Structure formats: structure tokens, C-alpha cells
Image (cartoon, rainbow, N blue to C red):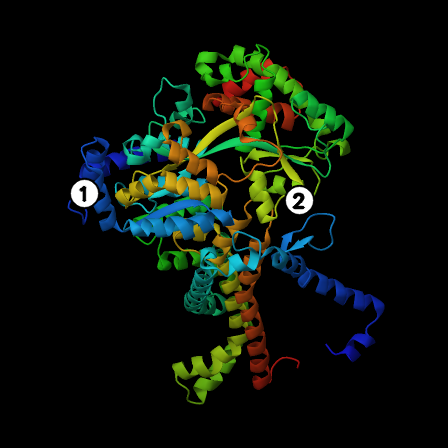
Amino acid sequence: MTTQGLRRLSVGQRLFVLAVLAFTVGPFAPLLIQSFAFRWAWPDLMPSVWWFEQRQISPFPLAWDYVLSPTSQVLEATINTVGIGVAVMVVCLIICLPAARVLARGHFRGKRRLEFVFSLPLLVPEAAIGIALLMIFIGLGISGTYPGVIAVHLIPTVPYMLRMLTSVYQGLDAGYEDCGRVLGANEWQVLTRITLPLLLPGVLAGALFTFLVSTNLFLLTFFIGQGKIVTLPTLLFSQISGGAMGATAAGIALIASIPGLILLVLSDRLIREEAFALGIGDT
Amino acid sequence: MQNLKKMGWSAALLTALLSAGSTHAMSDDEFRNEFLAGSMAWSEVESRAQEEGTVNFYYWGGSDIINLWIDQVAKPALAERGVTLNPVRISATKDTVDVIIAEIASGKGSGEGSVDMVWVNGENFFTLKQQGALWGSFAHKLPNSANFEWDETDPRSLLNLRDFGTPTEAMEMPWSGEQYVCAVNRAHVTQSETPATFADLKAYLEQNPGKFTYVKPPHYLGNTFVQSVLYAHNPEGSGADPFQNSLEDLGVERLATLITPGFEYLKELDPLLLGGPQGNPRYPESSSELDNLFLNSEVHFNCKFGLYGVHTGLITGTYPERAEEMIFPKGNMIKNKNYLAVPLNSPNPAAALVAINYFSSVEAQASMMAQAGMPAGVDMWTLSAADQARITEAAPPHYGVTQAELDANIAPDTNASLVDVIEGTWLEVIERGSNKPIKQVVADVVAGLN
């Protein structure tokens, strides 16, 4: 938004923008300060001792020195988190695209009930199914492995993706595809030239959700990964169990938000460019 | 759960019977039997450990300085012995206990699990032992077991033989010895105001309402505070002694009589705790939450297992600058140990034994004290003069009190069978504010347990 745009807003609207900013950017401010703090106690507005003041005399690496040291396992966790997130996203799309097409276009008995059943995994708490799932996964021989963790991440992500893609499919008139076929396109061309481009905003939004949910799963990741597969959430949980947050936990929390942030920016761009190129939407 | 237990047992038995052997010359079961029977030389264990190669060590990873010690000291030391230490940092040991039990229940028996070694004590050890998920009585067979007192006739051996009242039967090796120590913020409390007894504490809180709280039972830190209150208010005047007996030996009636004065005190203390003056006493859920209240001067004291808690808090910035230790409650500072255990289905048991033997060496204990602020678990009187000096020199500093004063005020832990009853009584009397007589509450809780 340009400054001119801001000036045109009424006082109430400006306050609203401020409130939105406070709620979105606000939580990051104390995290950022905490990550550079050594001792930050109430009622001090700012830390009484900073990390860089203590750094020289500390007998061990503090705050960011620890976060960036190999002991923190941050690098390994980031690679695992992003890798698993991307894999979950791809597998989820492969499962959900055909399913959504049927749910959106098909007419059959019990469709409503089926849609409801597909949403059920969202209602079950992770803690309740973790152990039972672990026992099944042990039986299958995939506990403690990457395929196991990716499979278990599909449970809470498929319902999201399915809901999102179904509604996008519903908004997509089958007439477009028929037009293509009438004009001589084969099924592959219809899929890649017509259906997917029109679905892209929905696919991207669904993919983004899937990635974000996957990168935030703790308990299922811990149980199925048996602690051997370290991700940013499992790392963070071992740091903040108990409510207090130190400098290293704050640093890891900041790093944990980076993959999601990058994807958010990327997908935002893609959606805009695609929408613009195809000439739909109101821009 | 009952079913799970049964499944666990039968699965363990089944695999023990049918075990198909492994890549080693000797199967995991044969190795276990021979080692536990004492018919195996330590050098054989060491060479098997090198064949196994790796040891997966599951431990609470919330402390940066402990993580650093593991990576910088323990890892290279074990690498020299031909074993790769793979530290797996967890947020709650209970989660790992669940994983081990689930593995065994789904048929992953001897040698087929994922955890080689786990840092445990109290309830988690009790669960593993009860479910038959432990490898065996190995601890007194390690070379470095010489650094510990195992003689039952010596009362000092109690900390190695009993873990919160549960007999350890050498199924876990002591690692570190802790003491329940309270820290005081000297920015608010002068030397003369510092309480030494529970009556002093109450007097202080009447002057400064809301400036104390303890971790909420059934968290073991909360239970420990309650236990020390009960010891101090024991109407027979015998302190911790009767609390060493099991519920069966002590009897419900006698237990109720023993704990009534203590609970009367806790009831009187309740409105004086943090938030109490506003009518809503607040008990933190964990030790780190209490650390934070202490750092922010919301409370003036912080009681937890942390012989070097003040030192650690000061070097990590989690304690206020003027924190010091205090001797409180006089004569009733509870001491216990925490341990390293090997699960029944450890895939690398020999490597785990070599690692545990290293962790209980004087070399490892001294460096872990100095660098990670963890008190030594070895028993000083079993060591040579040179080793004793090594441990003493490695000890981090105390603030405001001496080690001798801390040693002079210790008390033992409470029998695990009583802990459940005391916990239940606390929840009824303090949490739910029941006005029933304590005797009645205790009887109800015991009836509810069976």
C-alpha cells in the first residue's frame, strides 16, 4: 500500500490496519529481542544483559552461537522439515486432485456423507492416535523412516487439501474442458493446458496449507520418527517444554518460521502472476 | 492398558523364545544371558560394542549446556572407544517410554527396538520395569560400578538401590545425584529474613504475601516439596523415617495421622502463595515456568532439584543476578539420583553398556560437573583420594552456602507407594479445596487406587 493510499483512509481504518499489523508482525518482535537477550526480566522493557555483552565471558556458546553450532541440530532439522514438507505436498496433490474431481463433479449416493468422513481426521487429536499408529507403522516396518513420517503427515493434511481442491473444482466449469476437446485437444492437453492452469490458485493455496501443517506437526512426527528424525517442531518442543522461552528457543523458533515465510511469498507471487497472465480475477 | 501390558509380556516372551539371531557371532539374547550371568569378559563386551558401532541415547534435550557436553565431550570420548554416540533429544522422557512399550507390544523384541539407552528416574523407570521392558540387572557388572555403593547394609547405598522407592535391581545405573535446593533472590530477601523452616516461610509470606509458590503436584518437583513439608511436620518427630515404608507396612490409618499436620500447613500456606492474595493461588506446571516467575521477581524463591541450579541459572541468564542458594527446609532437603537404563529391545546393547560405563567413570563425571552443571552421581567414599580430589575440583561454585551445609541437611525420598496417596490427597485437599477430614480423604484416595 502506498503512503498516498494510507492518507486516504479514515482514522478508524488506519487503526484497523495498525491492529492487523500488530497481530501479524507483533508476535515476532519479542521473539527477535529474546533471541539476542542473555537476561530479560520483568519489568525491564529491554534485556538487562544482551547476548553479545555476555558472549566473550560465557564458558559455552550462547543464544545465536548455540543455534548456529552443530549441537543445536538446526541445519539437519531444517533440511528434514523442508524435505518432508515438500514430499507431503506432492503426494497429497497426487491423492487429492482426482478425488476432488470426483467429489466436485460426480453425482452418487452418499456423497455428502463421504465428504464428511474424509474430514474426520481433522477432529481426532494427534495424542489419541499417535501410539496406535506407531504400533501399526512398526508392524509395517516403516517406523523411524522418512516414508513413515511422510505417510503419517498425510493423515491431517489430506482433508485440508481435499476440501480446498473440491471447492476450486466446483468453481471450474466443465464446459472449458469440453471446449478444448471439441477443438481437438487430447486428455493430456486438456489437463495440462486447461484444467491445471485454471486450478492453479486453489492448488497453490492447498499446497501452502499442506506444507504449513506438515512443518508444524510435532507429536505424530516424534512418535513415527521415533525421535530419530529431527524436524524443527521436535527440536523446538525439546527447547520450550514448560512455557519459558530462552534465547536459543527464540532463535530456533525464528528459524522454524522461515520455510513457511518463503513459501508464502513465493506462492503469493505465483498466484498473482498466473491470475494476471490468464486475465481472471479483478486486478 | 491392561491388554497392552499383557501383549507386551507375551510378545517379549515369544521373541525371547523364537529369536532368530542377528548379524553378530552371538545373538542378542545369548549376549544378554551371558553378560547377565557374569560369564563374559569386559573386553568381549567392548569388541562387540565396536561391531555394533552406534548407540542411540534418548534424553531430555532442553538444556543447552548438557547438549553441548554430550556433543563436545561424551561423543569424542566414545568415538575413541569405537562407538558412535547418537544423541536423540526429546522433550519428555514419557514419550520415549511409550515408544519402547509400543515397540515391544507390537513384537519388536530383543535387538529389534530403536532405543539403546535412556535417561530416566522415578515414574518412567517404574513403568519400564513394571512392563518388563528393561534389559536386565547390568549395573553392578560394569567395571565402573566400583564407583558406587551397592552394599545393602550400608544405608548410603539406598540412592543406588531405590529410585523413588522402586527397587532398581541394577536395571539402571546412577548417573547424577541431585538435591532439592531452594534459591533466593537477594534483591528482595535479606540474610536475616531468609527462612530456614516452614514456620519461617509462612511468617515471611505473611509479611510479603504471594512471593512464593511450588510446582504443582503430581509433577515430581511439587510432590517433593509436599514430601519435605510432611517430613518436617511429622507428629512423631521422626522426620523422613516412617515415609520409607511401603503403604502396606505403614497402614492407611498411620499414614493419615503422619500427614495430617503437614496438610494443615499446606492449607494455611495456600492463600499466601503467588496469586493467593487475589484469591486465586497459582501453582506453575513445570520447573521452567517457576524459573521464569523467579527471574521476573514474581516470586522470591525457587525450589527444585538443582544442586548447582543457581550456578547454571546465572551462566545461562535464566536466574536473577542476585540469586543465591539457601538451606531450606533445615534437615529435610530431599536427595535422589537419576539413572541410565537400557531397554529390553535395545538394538545395540553392548554399545549401550560401554557408553554407560563411560558415563559413570570419574573422567566423565568430573567433566560433566564442570561443563554441564550436573552433580556427580558416583559415591565419593568409594573413590581413591586422587579421584575424590578430581571430583571436588570440578564442582561448580555454590552461592551463599557451602557444600558441607548442603550435605548436613539431606533427607531421603518418599516410598513410591506413598507418593501416589500423598499426590491424590494434595489434589483433593488443596486443588479441590475439600473440607473433609484428612483421614477421610486418605482413605478415599487409597480406596480409589485399588
User: Which is nearer the N-term, disc 2 or disc 1?
Assistant: 1
User: Residue B31 appears at what percent x and percent y?
Assistant: 20, 39
- Farthest residue toward the bottom? A183
- B238 relative to B280 in the view: left or right: left
Q: Chain of mark 1?
A: B
User: Residue A171 appears at what percent x and percent y?
Assistant: 56, 73
Q: Chain of mark 2?
A: B
Confirm whether residue A243 shows in the render: no
Which residue is at a point 45% across and 41% down the rendered structure image?
B93
Q: Quadrant of residue B332?
A: top right
In the rendered image, the vertical position of residue B105 relative to residue A57, given as above or below: above
Q: Quadrant of residue B387?
A: top left
Q: Amino acid at mark 1?
A: Ser
Confirm whether residue B229 shows in the render: yes
Report the residue marked by disc 1: B27
Please identify the quadrant where the N terminus of chain B is shown.
Answer: top left
Look at the numbered disc 1 and give the secondary structure of its residue: loop
Between A235 and B18, the residue placed more toward the observer is A235
Between B434 and A247, the residue placed more toward the observer is A247
Report the residue marked by disc 2: B321
